[in-house]
Amino acid sequence: MPIQELSQRYNSLQVAIELLRKDFKIKVLLEKSKTTDPEDFFLEHRTTIRSYLALTHAELETYFEGRALEIVNTLEKFWISFPNTVYPLLDFNKDSEANIKTKSKSSDSKTFEELVIENIRKRTGIFRNKISNNNGIKKKDVRALFHPFGLDFGTLDSAWLENLEVYGKKRGDAVHQSSEMQKRIVISDVEKELEEILAGAQDFDSYITVLLSKVDLSKECTAQSP
């Protein structure tokens, strides 16, 4: 897929990662690691390396969650603009107008359109909670965030997804294991994996941008239809 203009969220991710690299003096650590025994180097800098891994992982999490939230907000706006058109597609209690009204405590004072909008907001609210409760960047986490919107994982680079899996596992080990139990983390491997994740995320970012543009195009077409 040709690279589209990168989103503001992706640009913010890059800025955040560069700030962390500067704050943790990653270039200095990389140079030092070349001339120091690997085990001694990790023992000396393990807190820094573990913290860097955890914080860069958090920035990646924020990026994915932010993009998922953009999709939810865009779809909610679209659905609310055309509630009578889209409600059968949303499987509201088997598309039954009577059932939608029955489920509302104040249905007598609301129009059918208002009830559909209420249901739309409930549904999108549930997914917003799912996004806020996300706690990872592994394949299963990314799939849970984006598969409901029709993201075809078969089109994504399998090596990139595997990098997410490896990085997510390393972060899990770093934050859930004690210093005594912690396996050695090689800072050069962390940087290589992070750089590959950021590079692959450009294609992913373009995919999401195209997905969002299709929603906007659908809205235009619907608005112009007789």
Image (cartoon, rainbow, N blue to C red):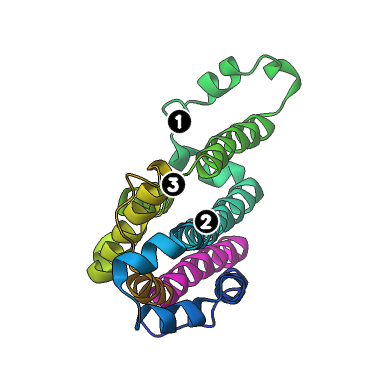
Q: How packed is label 3: few (under 14 Cα within 10 Å), some, or many (20 or more)?
A: some
Percent x, y for residue 81? 65, 50
Q: Which mark is residue 58?
A: 2
Q: Is residue 152 visible?
A: no
Q: Which residue is mark 3?
A: 175
In contact (CB < 8 Å): disc 2 and disc 1: no
Q: Quarter of the image containing the N terminus?
A: bottom left
Percent x, y for residue 91? 43, 34
Helix, strand or loop under label 3? helix
Helix, strand or loop under label 1? loop
Mark 2 or 1 closer to N-term? 2
Residue 214 in magenta stretch: yes
Q: Which residue is mark 1?
A: 95
The residue that appears at 61% across and 52% down in the rendered structure is 73
Q: Quarter of the image containing the C terminus?
A: bottom right
Q: Quadrant of residue 202?
A: bottom left
Q: How packed is label 1: few (under 14 Cα within 10 Å), some, or many (20 or more)?
A: few
Helix, strand or loop under label 2? helix
Q: Which residues are magenta?
A: 199-226
